[in-house]
Structures are given as structure tokens and as C-alpha cells.
Image (cartoon, helix red, strand yellow):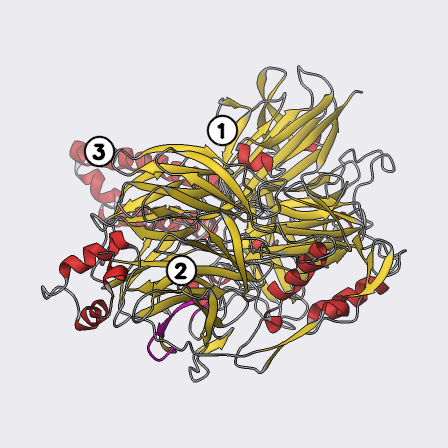
Amino acid sequence: MLETTWRESLFGLIDGEVAKSLLIQSWTVFIAKFEGIFPTTVLETLGEVGASAKAYFYREAIKMTKIAVLIFCVFTFMQAAHADTESGKTHLITMKAAKLDSGQLAYQMVSHKIRDASGQVEDITGRYSPEPTIPGPAIVMTEGDKAEVTLEQGIKGSNEPVSIHVHGVHYKIDSDGTMKVFNHTSDQAAFPGKPYTYKWTAALGTAGTWPYHDHAFGNPVLGSEDKGLYGTLIVNPKGGKVSAMIDGQIKQVDIKDVKREFILWMHETTFWGQELNHLANRQVPLWTNPTIGAREGELVRFHVIGIGTAFHTFHLHGHRWIQPGTSHLVDTVNIGPIVREAFVIKAGEGVGPGNWHYHCHVLQHMQSGMMGGFRVIEN
Amino acid sequence: MTKISKLTAAILMTGFTGSSWAAQSGADDLILSVPGLMPSAVLEMSDEPGLWFKDPVDGDALVVIKPAQAAMIKMTDTNTEHTITSLLWPAGAENFPVDQEKPSSASVTQAFNKPGLYVFTCKVHPYMFGAVVVDDPNTKGLDIGSELQLVTGAKVPASSDLAKRLLRTFFVATTPSLWRDYSKPKWEVNLPDIPLNIEGNTISLSALSMTMPNELKKPGAPGVGEVWVNTQFEMIEGKKKPGTATRINTRSWSTTNKFKGIKEDMNNPHNMWTDKRYEYIYQTQWFDKKLLTFDRANGQVYSNIVVGESPSHVMTRPANDMLYVAINAGEQVVKMTGGKNPSAQNSINTGPHTSPHGHYITDDGKYMLTPNALASSVSVVDLDSEKTTEIPTGGIIPIAVWGTMDGQRAYAANLLGTPPLLSSLTVIDIPGKKKLMDINLAADYDPVSGKISGEAYGLLPIQTPVSPDGKYVVTANTLSASLTIVDTATNKVIKSLPCEPGCHGVHFGMKQGGGYYAYAASKFANDLIVVDMDKLEIAGRVLLSDPKDSSIKAHNGMGGQGILALPLVEHGNLKETLKLSGKGELSPEVEGWLKELTPEQKGI
């Protein structure tokens, strides 16, 4: 019984309260059974032997108590940990897939509200561009958050399904954002007038920068990410800190201290950019091969992501960073399709202000214009 | 025609404002980034006939934007690599020309400041056309510009005959409904009444309209054997990519059948060759990466093998029947074993950024010559040692080469001429591995007035074989829609014959009773022109479409490019086939063809 309780609790099949109750019950039963089999009066009649037996069983009982206490502590810890994995926040998001005037496709934020554990709702839709953009809206979550993302098919002149397939976070199979031909379950896509809702959980261990993209439009296998249907999901760690090489040392940087974030998607031979500006509290589309800007000494975070078929080498002049989870210092990283690199740097650290270049270091890609500037302005 | 409304709308369009959400440097102190160009229009390069640069909004190959707006050209709808290259643009336009050193899967976003016409192409597939018209809403008519600069460096007035020809060719090439369909009595190029602003004057686009009668004619004398034509633009039910190989019976001058490659989704079949027994057809897929091998007699597919980006032409070396496949978006020719399942043996490097297209192997099998589209050169490869000598020729996009049967001289067609020549053939001394001279194919053409004062009228030359008797070079000229015939004794154009829009492929075949026919196929027409090489006259026009074949969804018989006439006229190859004759190694059909040949045709 005790063992069963252990196992079930550990595997999370029953919650901590039930486990505690079962533990107490089983302990009571144990004592009752011992006293039922060997009543005190009987033991006393057995003299020393009885005393020894009693002492033995009580020693065992103490051992069992210790184990019980241990188990109880484990339950308590598990309960606390379990409670701590959920922030209670749910992102209620509505996005639309739309066609730009140029004929490219793009996602657009329609509404983003955050409901906290107490039921209070904060509307952050105003942070986003009111137009569809490439890349699409950057959704920012924190480990422990959940999201319900509803997609509308708003592509003019088309009745085809369109979807969102997200990377990194947890979701059930019905939120895979693929078609039945792919997932063998159902078409998880929006049709005109028939939105589709995806449920994501930014569980512990999903912190990072992740892509989301269409997996259905125009081609039930590939989708239309190549036409512009892609965007960024940033899951910040629960602890609120990321490691970075700052002033020559690896430090834990509070994300709240990062006021500018630059998202650069590498597609074919073009950078498609976006800034998350926390000073102005808004997302700014930067379109193709932009100049990104910061003040000297500011902490800025880059999110570089590949899409399409080409392999790139992202290089930023004058700056270097550590790759997440390592002390490996780099100034160039390989970026293949859907591969991403997110890092924090101090703008102009050790090198000062200037119009620092960033580019793909595949020379042929540079030749097609795959480059831009990182403008570090003197304070 | 969607572009009509687009052009009209563009002329009427005023007051467009861009997104107001973009960061504005200076206006907003908190945001220090400066956005890059936001494309107002996009052209997606595709494998789709006519729509090689496709506007995703309406499927046209032309977009209209305003000054200071940007357009993006990208390659997400094609199975191979390309370059994004300015073919012509308003002289003096900022940041022009656009070009890349070698083919890739690039995307380019470009700002356009100067009003006018900007035409883009791909140097590997140089009839892929797309255009951006930058129209100033304050001027009357759609701005074409005053002076247009060509990629060759030449500048021509926008009102010149050459500019108008280019404009009309652009519309014909990119609008399948304007292609010349010989199943109809007339060819009508009806262009819409859209005011164009050319050098400040308003001219209607409809002034470039034209009508011509369509007259088919079967040649009087039959040919020997059969002719295969790559009808590269035919769209077939059950297949996404275009193209078939059409077989013509030269006795009846009718279409026997079409090889479609449905299961393989054969993509833009461009050029063919065969083995010495004429059992297999080796088929390149130019907008793809594969070489397809099928049974010549029954169409059974034996293999479909990846060989490299944009395989363009294939030939065999007579002595050993090995295949040599030019990798047009690479810098090599792949050597392969022949047979049902060709297997790559090695790659012969033709030089950096060469992009070899229509290569040639000499009759004795000693040399291979490659015209290097991106390197302005011709490479001569000694096939025994595989040592390559690259000969700079100064030609712009050398696209095809062929040689005399004695192995002494070769003629390379330079699609965009040899500056300052607008249109040229370069003569190569094969054993000497050097350039001898350029032949001006358009010596009798005035590009401004359009006056043609003699026979030398060939613009944008493509395939250029030398006749088996060594007397003539017949060149398909795609812009002038003409066949020029050069006398190899004088290296001068002695004759021009009318061809079709998009005149492209030429090759020789046997005429019954002796002599040769030259067969010419055109991209934007569905006839095969037959030229009698004894008379240097057009002997007939044979229909390549098959109106009875309901599986042909569109572009019936269109897209004529590579030509393979059997028996092969090349003596080196033919000799190997003749060796097998009478030994039970050849099919009765092939034996029958060989019996019809004269000693001269056999090279005896």
C-alpha cells in the first residue's frame, strides 16, 4: 500500500493531498495491525522475549516513521514544485493570416490579452503592429504560461486552409498545426470563417526563442512559410535571467534590463527584421536588411532564426557572445533552416559606437544583399 | 489579360501611402532602428512557362510601382538555381544593374528611383523575363523611359526599333495567350490600348500589336527517321511541371506521340541525345536537377537521376557511348556511363563560374567544347586527359557551340553579342584552342530605325549547329525570330529566313535521297520549321501540337527547344551505329532508316 502510494504520487497519478491522506491511513493501519497481532498484554506475559519483540517492532516503527516523514517531505516538495510550474497566466491570442499588397503572405496580431490566475485580464494588443508583417507578431511568454492561439484565415481570394505550427513549447496533437495527411488525426488549420484554436504550454524547460510557421497553405505538407507565414515565439525563463558575456564576464542578466530586442530572420538571401522595443513598449517591423540601433552600453538581445532551404553564417561585427548554456564565445554562428540563436550583448562593449555591420558570411549571399547595420549611438 | 487592368490601375493610381507603423528615425527617440526596404511588389521566379517571374497578386510577369518604392525578386517556386540579372534598365538608374556572380537561390530587394522599364532575366535560363515598371504618377502614360541601357553596355533610345522589339518580345514571351498557335488561322498579337510614356511622348502599347497568317506546309520530300522536339512548355494532366518530348514521323510529317514523364513530373525537358543503338533517349530537365532516361520506342522510363543544378544539354562521346551532361547552373560537365541507368563517373570542371550550356563533342571524340554562359568564354576539354583550356571570348552569355566535322573550327553563339557587336558568333580554332574572330549576325540591322538592309539580321542567337557537309552554320535567333545562315568559307551571313517568336533550337536531320534538313523549334510557337539545306529555303512547317490529346491541359505543342533527329547526322556517332548494322543489334526500324542513307550521309 505504502509502496503503491509512493509510486503513484511520484508518477503524478494522484496529487499530493491524496498521497498524504493515504500515507496516514497506511501508517495507522500498520500500527493497528501490529497491536492487533501482538497485544501489549500478551507481550508482557512473554517477559524479556516479549520486551525484545516489542522493542524490535517499535524500532521498526520508528524507521517507518522516518520513511514516512521523508515521503511526506517529498510530497510537500513535489506539491510546491508543481504549483510553481504554473504561472496561472493564459495568453488569449487571436491572429490572422493575410495577404500583403505585394502578394506576400503574413501573420497579423488581432488581439492579445493575458489572463492571470485571479482572472484579471490585461490587453497588450497595442504593442503589435496593426498591419500584417514579415516576420509575424513576436509572441512573448514566460515559462509557466499557457496560450490559446486562435488563427483566422484572412487571405483574400483564397479558401485554402492556413495554420500555425509552433516549435519548442508543449501542445497536444490537436494543436500541431498540420493537416490530416501529415498528422493522421485531423486538419488543424483555419478556413475562411472557421478559425482554429491552438493550445500551447510554455512548460518548464521550454525557455528559448522558437519559430512558428504555417504548415498548410498552398501545400498540405510544406505550407507557405516561404511566402512570409512565419513568426517568433520567445519563452523567457521563469527565473527571469539569462546568461551573457558582459564586461568580459559571464553574468546572469535580468531580462527586464534588456530594453531592445532585435529579431532577424534569414530567408534565402534576405534578413527580415523586427524590433521589440520595451522602452516604447511596441513591436516595430523592420522589413528587409534593416539597420538596427541601440545606445552604447545598453543591453540588447538578438534572436537570429533561419527559414527556407539555405544555410547561413550569421556574423556581427565588433561584438561577441556566448552560446546559450556554454562559455563558448563566438561572433559567427551557423544558421540553417529553423535553427536559431538568441543572445544578449552590451552594445558597443569594448569597441564603442559605430555603424557595425551584420551579415551572412556566405559571400554569395552577401552579394545578393544579405547584410545590414547595427548602429551603436554614443551616449 | 490581368496586366491590362494592372497597368491601367497603375496609371490612375495616386496618393498611395505606405505603412505608418514603421520606425521613423528621429521622429521617435526611443526607436533607433531604421527599417530596410519594404517590398511593394514581389516577383517569384518559377518553372511555369511564361511566368518565370510571377507576381503573386495576379500571376503576371510585370509589376508596377512608384518611384522610391521597392520590389523583391525571390526564388521560392523553382526546382533549380538562377541569377537575378538586369537585362535592361533606364540609363543612369541608381543601384543598377542587379546581378550575381553565379546561380543560387537568392532573393533580392531593390529600390527603384528612376521612372522607366526595368527588365530582369536569369543568365542561366535567359528567356526568363520579368519586369518592373516604375511609373511616376505625375507624368502622362506609363513611364518606359528615355534611354534604356542593356546589360551589354549598349544604350538605346526607348523609341528605337530594338527597344520596341524587346518590349513586344517581353509581352509575347510572358503572355501564353499571345503565343503563335498554328492550329489557328492567324497569329494575333493584340496589345491593350495603354498609354506609354516613351521619351516624353505618349504612345499606345497597342501600336505594337500585329497580325500574321499561320500557314502550315508539309515538306515535299520526306526525311529519314524521326525527329524528337522538346515541347518544353506543354502542360499535361497529372503533372505539375511543364514539358514533353514530341516525336515527329518524317515520312508523314505528323506527330507520332509525346513522351510526358507524368510519374516523374518531368520538369522543363530541354535537350536530348541517344545511344549508338538508338534504344534510349537521354533527357535533360533544365529547370531541375535530373537526367531522365526513357525507352525511345515505347516510352518506358528507366531512370531519373540527379546530376546537378539545371542540366541543359547531353551528348555522347562516339567511341565509348559515355554521356556528357552540361550542368548549366554549375561549373562542370558530368561524365556518366550510358544505358538504362546512367551512373556518374566524374565531373569535368570547365572553369570558375562558367555555367556551361549547349556543349559539343567533336566527331573524332577528341575534344569537348563548352560555351560558358556566365564566364564570357568557351572551354576546350581534351577528353582523354580531361584537361580544360578556357578561352576568353568577350561574348555575353555564350549559350551554344557546334563544330565542323573535321574538328577544326567551332562556332559559339553569344546570346547578347560581343560588345560592341549586338549579336555575334565567335569562331574558335579547336586544336589551336584560340578565338579566331567574331561574326556580326546583325550587320545589316539598324537598331534605332529598324531598317534591315541585307541578310545579316539575327538578334539574340541561340542554337547554332554546323551542317554535316561543313558548309553552313544555321543559327536560331530568338529576338529577331529569324534563322541566319553563315557561309563557313567566308564567315558571313548569306541568308536570313523567317523563324518564329522565341526561335531557339536547331539541328540537322537526313533528307531522303541525300542532303539534309535543318529543323528549327521555337519557344512561343507550336510549329517545327523544316529548312532544305540544298536550297537554303523553308521546305515546310509541321505542327507540334496534338489537338486530339485531351491530356494536354495547356500550351499544346509550345516551348520548342532541343531537337534530336535520328539517325544522327554526326559522322562520328553514326559510324558507331553503322558498325552494328546487320548484326542483329539494332531494331528493324533503325536498320530500315540506315538503309535509306546515301554514302555521303553515312560519311563514306
Q: In the rendered structure, are the residues bearing label 3 and label 1 in contact, judged by CB atoms less than 8 Å apart? A: no
Instruction: Give B547 or B588, whichever is nearer the viewer.
Output: B588
Name which quarter of the figure residue B239 lies in. bottom left
Which label is found at residue B507?
2
Query: Circle 2 sits in a helix, a strand or a loop, which is it?
Result: strand
User: Label 3 sits on what residue type?
Assistant: Ala
- Mark found first going from the N terminus, 3 or 1: 3
User: Label 2 sits on what residue type?
Assistant: His
Disc 3 packing (10 Å; few <14; some 14–19; many ≥20): some
- Lateral position of residue A113 relative to residue A335, left or right: right
User: Circle 3 sits on which residue?
Assistant: A51
**Is residue A166 shown to the viewer in this render?**
no
- x and y percent of residue B526 in the render? 50, 72
Q: Which numbered disc, 3 or 1, marks the residue closer to the eye? A: 1
Q: Which numbered disc, 2 or 3, marks the residue closer to the eye? A: 2
User: Label 1 sits on what residue type?
Assistant: Gly
User: Circle 1 sits on which residue?
Assistant: A325
Name which quarter of the figure residue B604 lies in. bottom left
Residue bounds of the magenta highlight: B239-253
